[in-house]
């Protein structure tokens, strides 16, 4: 996400939805302001594809929907419309929605240097307003690390971190897989630097 465009007016949610349909870029909507979404690196894209593929294959035929970064998320009663790198809804109330989903159980963001602070801080705070969200996943792009925030039975968020050689568990969709699957075909910058020195 980049800063709000100064020349754009503040929108109501209805005005935003109508306006964004006519735009070439995607824009998040936060309390009346719109923010353009930025592109990512090759690692960012590959990890997002890997993650979406793993989740989609697991949920096939189970009544859930899996979305990539083109899908809009509505945070109910909060005047928020956001985009995530991956989102999952298994709620019947989202079954026939065509514009956005409102009841995600799982949201994931693939981190990049330009958005990491936002994804960890303000964006997570916005996502926490979702009444249906059970897990929020942050995936590194510069090293093999995954952090999962889970809402416990008291409504508090607990962090579990995963590193190389470990098995990731997504309780919200009853899925376990090795972290190496998520980082398949990923070349980290340090590895790239080492291979160029060997030439």
Image (cartoon, grey):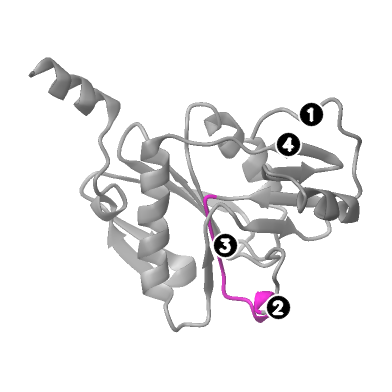
Are the residues flagged by discs 2 and 1 in contact, CB closer than 8 Å? no
Q: Which residues are magenta?
A: 85-95
Which of disc 2 and disc 4 is earlier in sequence?
A: 4
Residue under circle 2? Answer: 93
**Residue 187, above or below 24:** above
Secondary structure under badge 2?
helix
Q: Would residue 109 be counted in the magenta stretch?
A: no
**Neighbour tally class for label 4: few under 14, some 14-19, many 20 plus, Cα within 10 Å:** some
Residue under circle 3? Answer: 134
Residue 176 appears anywhere in the view:
yes
Residue under circle 4? Answer: 35
Q: Would residue 93 be counted in the magenta stretch?
A: yes
Left or right? Give the position of 124 relative to 185: right
Which of disc 2 and disc 3 is earlier in sequence?
A: 2
Which of disc 4 and disc 1 is earlier in sequence?
A: 1
Secondary structure under badge 3?
loop
Q: Nearer the viewer, mark 1 or mark 3?
A: 1
The x and y percentages for residue 92 are 65, 81
Q: Splitting the image into 4 quarters, where does residue 61 fall?
A: bottom left
Identify the residue at image location x=70%, y=73%. 97
Residue under circle 1? Answer: 5
Quadrant of image for the N terminus: top right
């Amino acid at each position: 996400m980049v800063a709000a465009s100064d020349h754009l007016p503040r929108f109501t949610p209805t005005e935003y939805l109508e306006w964004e349909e006519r735009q070439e870029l995607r824009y998040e909507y936060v309390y009346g302001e719109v923010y353009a979404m930025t592109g990512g690196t090759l690692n960012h894209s590959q990890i997002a594809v890997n993650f979406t593929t793993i989740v989609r294959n697991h949920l096939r035929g189970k009544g859930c929907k899996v979305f990539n970064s083109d899908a809009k998320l509505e945070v109910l009663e909060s005047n928020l419309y956001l985009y995530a790198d991956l989102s999952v809804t298994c709620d019947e109330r989202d079954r026939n929605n065509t514009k956005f989903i409102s009841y995600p159980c799982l949201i994931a963001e693939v981190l990049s240097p330009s958005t990491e602070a936002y994804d960890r801080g303000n964006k997570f705070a916005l996502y926490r307003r979702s009444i249906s969200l059970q897990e929020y996943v942050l995936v590194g792009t510069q090293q093999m690390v995954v952090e999962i925030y889970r809402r416990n039975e008291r409504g508090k968020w607990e962090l579990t971190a995963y590193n190389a050689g470990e098995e990731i568990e997504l309780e919200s969709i009853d899925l376990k897989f090795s972290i190496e699957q998520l980082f398949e075909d990923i070349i980290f910058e340090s590895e790239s630097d080492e291979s160029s020195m060997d030439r």
